[in-house]
Amino acid sequence: NVDVGDGCGVPQEASMEPKDILRLDPLVVNQIAAGEVVTKPPNALKELLENALDAGASTISVEVEGGGLDRLRICDDGCGVKQADLPLLCERHATSKLSKFEDLESIETFGFRGEALASVSYVAKVHVTTKCRGDECAFKQSF
């Protein structure tokens, strides 16, 4: 049981008035969530490297400017992202790693929640260029 508020005790003389409870704007919610996942450039780098490894990359290059605050660029030879999936790439809880709760029992990847790129996109400009095997050209999307 959880008891909150009235009946839990008699309040002392309070000099503070209670504030209204408001729903946060979705942008604020996403920025707070981004802070939980990506608090510093090394955290963002870790998430992006894990995405590359999960995509089967065997070669990954990293370019950093300004300690990662000005630019963080990751290039890899992973399988890429399908053009049709690009709009979902930075959407929270959009993932290719699972489709139902039971899939968690057999996860064999670093990431699976679909939060890394979404979180990065709420605190930085994200530009993705991707090409899958068989594509005639690469595709670019910015978030």
Image: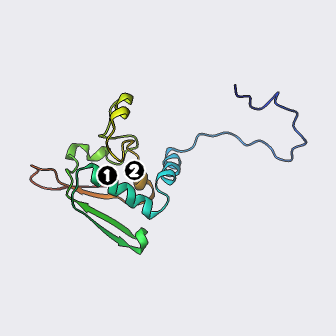
Report the residue marked by disc 1. 51
Quarter of the rendering occupied by the C terminus: bottom left
**For mark 2, what is the residue?**
116
Residue 121 point in image, percent of width and height: 40, 54
Mark 2, Cα crowd under 10 Å, few <14 / some 14-19 / many 20+, is: many
Q: Can residue 112 be seen in this view?
A: yes
Q: Where is residue 131 in the image (x, y as percent from the top left)?
A: 17, 54
Q: Is residue 19 left or right of residue 110?
A: right
**Pair 2/1: label in front:** 1
Please say if 58 is above or below 20.
below
**Amino acid at circle 1:** Asn
- Amino acid identity at mark 2: Ala
Residue at 16 percent of width and 50 percent of height: 132
Q: Residue at x 31, y 39 (%)?
A: 97
* Residue 39 % position (x, y): 50, 58
User: Which color mode does the image show?
Assistant: rainbow
